[in-house]
Image (cartoon, helix red, strand yellow):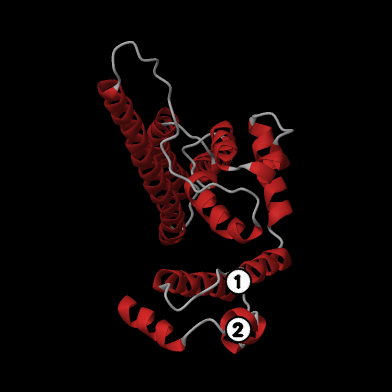
Amino acid sequence: MAELKKAKLTRARVKGQVTRIFNYISTEQGITYQQVETRCHKLEELWAAFNENQLQLEELRIKEEEQLEDVVKEEEGERIVFETMYYEATDKVRSVMAETQQAANLVVMQEQQTNREQPPGTINVKLPTLTLPAFDGEYEKWMSFKDAFTSLIHDNRKLTAVQKFQYLRSTVKGEALQVISGLNTTSENYVIAWDHLKGHYENKKLIINSHLTRLLEFPQITKDKHKTLKQFIVHISTHLKALEVLGQPVNQWDVLEKMRVSELLLVDNSLIESVANRSV
């Protein structure tokens, strides 16, 4: 009975280790190829340990005169559960391993390319390789900046928190930079800095008001300036689309009523149709 209990505890311990590996690979940021590879080997060891222990456990149950049919049925369920856990963890580990290896290869290739292109005697300074939009504190630009930064940097598990903070500092300007200027570039401060920016600029009401203000700031249009007229159309369409994404019922608005009538009187409908037809 004691041996059977020990075998069950061993099985639970093995399953727990597989779960921890899966959770670590799924949530850890800035993980290296070596860390992933180590856990891949560990999963293989756990697979062998489980099968050896499971066979022993089944033999112990049969020795204790349990019904063979019941033992087979119940323990087959345990095997299925573990196999599902193991394969999910293995697939995740190998997927992340491929990603980290690809990232490492890319860095090596970029460094080799940089070394080939540099003239002799040049100091090798590693610059950011990701192109990100700058954000200067204008509310109507926040959502597009946040989406791009989140996708390329914030959710990138190959980057450390310090690296993410460095990218953040390099992409914010003016007022936005002042919001985080008092924070040192550390792992702990990255989350604080990102939360500061979101708390300051992720204000839906102010973003909507900013788009409405920009919507009314269009250049004066004259009949002999087709280029200006086309810019006018793009200007209006851009801000209306942004307002629509923010949940504003722009299709129900009479936009012309919201604009300065004195400006709109300078717009010739025939010119608008002409520019629109050329754009098709």
Question: Which residue ends up furthest to the top in the rendered image?
Answer: 121
Q: Do callouts 2 and 1 mark residues in contact (Cβ within 8 Å)?
A: yes
Q: Is residue 34 above or below residue 214?
A: above
Asked where in the image residue 206 lies, by quadrant, the reply is bottom right
What amino acid is found at the position of numbered circle 2 in the picture? Val
| 138 and 96: which is toward the camera | 138
Q: Residue at the location (41% across, 28% down)?
A: 34
Q: Position of residue 111 (x, y in %)?
A: 33, 25
Labels 2 and 1: the sequence-earlier one: 1
| 9 and 253: which is toward the camera | 253
Q: Residue at the location (57% across, 54% down)?
A: 146
Q: Position of residue 251 (x, y in %)?
A: 56, 86
| 277 and 159: which is toward the camera | 277
Q: Which mark is residue 255?
A: 2
What amino acid is found at the position of numbered circle 1 in the picture? Leu
Q: Residues within 10 Å of mark 1 (few under 14, many from 20)?
A: many
Locate the C terminus and report the quarter of the image it occupies: bottom left
Q: Position of residue 254 (x, y in %)?
A: 61, 88
Q: Residue at the location (33% across, 10% down)?
A: 121
Q: Secondary structure at mark 1?
A: helix
> Disc 1 marks which residue?
215
Q: Is residue 117 left or right of residue 260?
A: left
Is residue 16 at least partly visible in the picture?
Answer: no
Number of marks drawn: 2
Question: Which residue ends up furthest to the left in the rendered image?
Answer: 116
Q: Secondary structure at mark 2?
A: helix
Q: Which mark is residue 98?
A: none
